[in-house]
Image: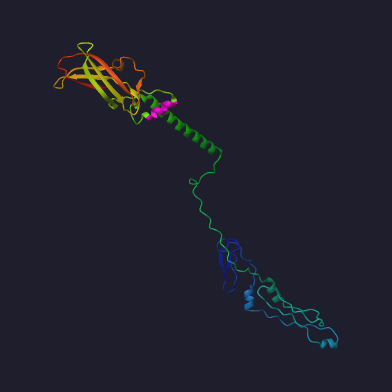
Amino acid sequence: MFINCKHCGSLVATDPATDQPPERCPRCRGVLRSAAPQVSVASLLKTPTPVADVAVPVVGTPAEQQAPPPATRASSIRGQDDLVETPAPADATVDRVAVDDTAADVTATAPVEPPLTAEIPPPAPTRASPSFARRAAPGPFDARMRRQHRILSGAVVALTLLLGLQVLLADRARLASDPGWRPTLARLCGVLRCSLPPWREPTALTVLARDVRPDGARPGQLLATATFRNDARWAQAWPRLRLTLSDVDGRAVGTRVFTAHEYLDTAPAQPTLAVGDSADARLRLVEPDARAVSFAFDFL
């Protein structure tokens, strides 16, 4: 048989002979019963203690003496209940009843065992983590350090962005010639009101018409004309025009580079040639060697 320790809740085996638990719990050393000898209810049920017959003196008249004897006190043990006394008839007179002192002491000192109930044992204590692995509770110093860390992180990010912006602005002249960087720099300069060098893409200039002929009004001179259009993605600066004259074998007999002011006969109205716009170039040349039979226009 087992009982639950009232101190730690663990199961403790009782003595099979006396059906009594040990004086102390084997696990927590808590006191389970007093040192005085106690008789359990189970032992009383197994070997009931006989009650000695007691002579009861009867006082009364002879008629009363012939009356049926009074009922004696019956002792019945029902589990853990005390002795139950059977009431005597009303006409019986009893002076006193002496009960065996041994049975009274045994019944009085019999312990009341608590019913065995299934108790949930307390959870096993968790092992504490080592001190170096435990996280200390946050304090005012930790909150101030976190706030300073956030401020420093924001400052580092802001300075990094500012440095990148300065690099872009300082090298915008070179980056503006890159088709991938120019849109970004154009938007950036639109916000910061900075200037970008004009876009240059001579290969995007398309020659629509060209001609070289003798100038009838001026003997010994040639009149060269050309019409070109800007097919680039952005407006670009006015190009330089190179005119090359060649002989029958394709060898160049004369070449010259003209600026926009020279082939337009005046200064351009706009600093750049817009996308899709066309322009007319007009040049007067001195007639070179008669071997010149072909010409070519190139944009620089």
The mark total stands at: 0
Q: Position of residue 160 (x, y in %)?
A: 43, 31
The quarter of the image holding the C terminus is top left
Q: Residue furthest front?
A: 216
Quarter of the figure with residue 172: top left
Along the viewing direction, whichever of 210 and 236 lies nearer the viewer: 210
Residue 42 appears in the rendering: yes
Q: 6 above or below 105? A: above
Is residue 188 in the magenta section?
A: yes
Residue sitting at x 38%, y 30%: 183
Quarter of the figure with residue 45: bottom right
Chief SS of the magenta region: helix
Q: Coloured how?
A: rainbow
In the image, the segment drawn in magenta is 183-191
Q: 183 above or below 15? A: above
Residue sitting at x 56%, y 65%: 11
The answer to whether residue 248 is left or right of residue 199 is left
The answer to whether residue 99 is left or right of residue 206 is right
The answer to whether residue 201 is left or right of residue 35 is left
Q: 85 above or below 145? A: below
Q: Position of residue 281 (x, y in %)?
A: 28, 19
Residue sitting at x 28%, y 22%: 227
Q: Position of residue 73 (x, y in %)?
A: 74, 80
Is residue 167 in the magenta section?
A: no
Along the viewing direction, whichever of 77 and 116 lies nearer the viewer: 116
Residue 171 appears in the rendering: no
Q: Residue furthest left?
A: 249
Q: Position of residue 102 (x, y in %)?
A: 70, 76
Quarter of the figure with residue 74: bottom right
The quarter of the image holding the N terminus is bottom right
